[in-house]
Amino acid sequence: MNNDKRLIDITWDEFQPLSLPAKIPYCNRNGCPYHVLIAQQFDRAMLDDLGILATKIRRIAKSKAGMLFLSSLLEHKRAMLYFSQPSSRTFLSFYAACQILGMKTAELRDSTTSSEMKGESQEDSVRTFSSYFDLLIMRSPIQGFAEKMAWLLSSTERPVPIINAGSGKDQHPTQALLDIYSLQRSFEKTGGIDGKTIVFVGDLLRGRTVRSLSFLLTNYRNVRQIFVAPPQLQIGPDILEQLDAAGVTYEVHHEFEPVIPRADAIYMTRIQDEWDKDGESKKLDTSAFYFTARHLALLKPQAVVMHPLPRRQEIATDVDRDPRAIYWRQARNGMWIRVALMATIFGRAPEVAAYYEQTLG
Ligand code: CP
């Protein structure tokens, strides 16, 4: 049954307060992502499909003929990267993913070069981008900004898909997709993500990657989530309510070292002090929440250490050489899952699958 709903049929005042599950039919079309706004819009089948597609794409990309095929898929499309918050990985991996698919790109990362300096609103800026581009990829410090823009464009002459590349403290859905893809690959030979214990460490209050990934993990059976943070930065009650509603087992701890031996994956995060009002988290001693080379001996042989990056001191650089440290692989996986995502948004997944069968299947 098709439950798709259209943003043009609802007012912003009706849409904004909807629960996250109630927003899903406005994001997806025919079981595939159209707008990518919230992690909640991805179910298990979509996560499996995207992971399989990303792996096919990276294998296809190993040959020149394969790269030429991939770059023909969206050569008639143009993407706008509108990043009003700093980014290295998300921006560059989307940029590279667009190149792989042959999509032309433009970018705006510094509002001092745009007509926002003349008083134009961000809403009007985005409406202008939609006149010229077929896909808008945007990062913003404003919670719900991508949702608002998807709604606003729905009633214009040129509505285009919008990808949320990080919004406020609330959502980073494509980071969660790459994290899931990294877990799928890491646990390929050990039964997959089902049944695993995932430990989140650091600034869990303000880390949007944790919030999005914690939700995506509810798609898997018997996953235990453990949250480890100083009391001031502990995971928010809204996430725990979500986990309760999904029947997920979780634990909340304020000590890191005792949980390390139980982890199948440790997801480290940095302190997000850019959200401080008064430098309050800079005053905290968070060193008890760092992962150091000494901790490698406590870690299961098949476990992985993850980080969305950028990092500061929370993972010592001498951990990087351990094969269980997968954060640099995570960053690369981000490019491939974003290629798969954009190919899916524009309906090109069947062509990729057919090419794979003909050449590598
Ligand atoms: N993980 C992540 O979002 O990194 P950037 O802020 O560098 O994009």
Image (spheres, rainbow, N blue to C red):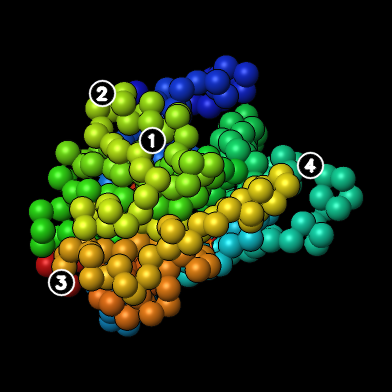
- Using the numbered discs, state the Cα–Cα distance from disc 2 to disc 4 in whole angstroms: 39 Å
Mark 4 or 3 closer to N-term? 4
Residue 303: image x %, image y %?
21, 62
Task: Give residue 122's quadrant in the image.
Answer: top right
| Furthest residue toward right | 118
Q: Is residue 163 left or right of residue 248?
A: right
Camera-side mark, 1 or 3: 1
Type of residue at label 2? Met
Badge number at residue 360: 3
Nearer to me, 81 or 360: 81
Whether the residue carrying mark 3 lies under 8 Å from ligand 1 is answered with no
Which residue is disc 2 drawn over?
Answer: 1
Within 10 Å of disc 4 (Cα), the crowding (few <14, some 14-19, many 20+) is few
Type of residue at label 1? Gln
Whether the residue carrying mark 4 lies under 8 Å from ligand 1 is answered with no
Residue 194 in view, yes or no: yes
The answer to whether the residue labelled 4 contacts the one labelled 3, judged by CB atoms less than 8 Å apart, is no
Residue 301: image x %, image y %?
16, 68
What residue do we see at 58% from left, 36% from top? 144
The answer to whether the residue labelled 1 contacts the one labelled 3, judged by CB atoms less than 8 Å apart, is no
Badge number at residue 121: 4
Which residue is disc 1 drawn over?
Answer: 40
